[in-house]
Image (spheres, helix red, strand yellow):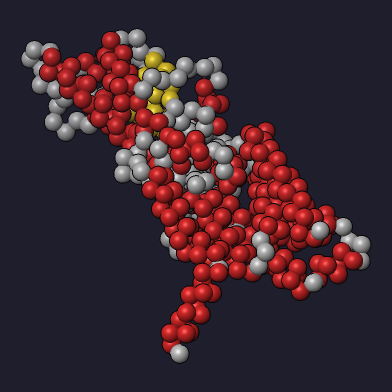
Amino acid sequence: MLFALIKKELLALVRDMHGLAALFLMPMVFIVLMSLTLKDIYRPPLAELSYAVDRRDTGTPAQWLQQIWQRSHGAPKALDADWQAQLRSGALKYVIVLEPGLSAELESAALSTQAHIRLLTEPGIDANLFNALRAELVGASGELKARLALAVPGTSGPPPGASIQALVNAERYATAGPRPTSVQQNVPAWLVFGMFFVVASLSSLFVQERSSGALGRLRSLGVSRVMLLMSKALPYLGVNALQAVLMLAAGIWLMPLIGGDALSLAGIHWGALVLALAAVSLAAVSLSLALACAVRSHAQAATIGPMVNVLMAAAGGIMVPKFVMPGFMQRLVEISPMNWGLEALLTVLLRGGGVADTLPQVGRLVVFAAAMFLLAVFLFRRRAS
């Protein structure tokens, strides 16, 4: 009897191809994705970051410092007239400003308290990456100063107790918006993930209504397929709106109570925030409708939806920050709808951006939402015919 029952369970498992895919295929894909995205987590890919140099000191030591930096980070981009705007938007990751007097400071045996090197980073840069860049710039400056001091007869380098760190001033370059914190960066990521997770609930309810005949009865009453899909979408748009309010509220009021930094919405553009959240919601609900119309059973709905959501998060910069990924994975991430939503929210919450600044990501999300809704209509019509 035990053998027969075991055989029955194995037959049921073999026939559930989607369940087997969740058990075997998803972990394998997840291992590949996470291994690739975390490839450089212990060696932050600083050389992959786009940067520019504003060399206001024309002396030879300043030129040598720039050459030392280029050996590890590649050639800098041309410093355009609008480099401040590029830095605020994240198109440039950082700019190194070599102030007048740097060469004389590097050649001197004494250290002044005035900073002659400024490291300006984009507002949304990760704290670990920010600190790594500053530490490397301090190290390169100190190494060059020591070499120059030892090359001059009768000098022995900086006096005891002197700190080369005073030579470098590092700051996130932002003219608007709140100060970047871990909460300021994490809330947008998990907000996008949560909004896309409506796929599990919507797919299950859709399959339940289809199997019970409720959708067929509504169609017999003359309700169009587009109307039925719209009736599914609108309530979940409301669910996404409630999710956004609750998660933002948790960042503002709950995080300080448990010892974390508070999410700050001071100075942000509220219209841009609402627009970005609406675009993310449209994309999430439209994708959910397409998947709901594609699956055939409750098992598929319970398996495929969450699996797609988790894999999109892994490959979209949600679970793993984009900055720790190797270069080719960073380019791959940029085609993910979750990454579009994340970048739109970071533009508002970290970079002080307005509606115009979020339009590239919002436009992609709206186009994606329209494509997924049309796919849902097509699949719904095909299943009903």
Kindly indicate the quadrant of the structure image that contains residue 68.
top left
Visible residue check, residue 111: yes
119 up-or-down from 365: above or below:
above
Q: Nearer the viewer, residue 207 or 81?
A: 207
85 up-or-down from 367: above or below:
above
Q: Which residue occupies 57% across, 43% down? A: 336
253 up-or-down from 126: above or below:
below
- Residue 212: horizontal and vertical position, in percent? 76, 74
Judged from this view, the residue extending furthest toward the bottom is 1
Look at the image and tell me in which quarter the N terminus lies: bottom left
Q: Which residue occupies 41% across, 20% down? A: 76
Visible residue check, residue 248: no
Q: Nearer the viewer, residue 180 or 125?
A: 125
Q: Is residue 179 left or right of residue 60?
A: right
Q: Which residue occupies 72% across, 65% down? A: 206
205 up-or-down from 159: above or below:
below
Q: Is residue 134 left or right of residue 267?
A: left
Look at the image and tell me in which quarter the C terminus lies: bottom right
Kindly indicate the quadrant of the structure image that contains residue 2.
bottom left
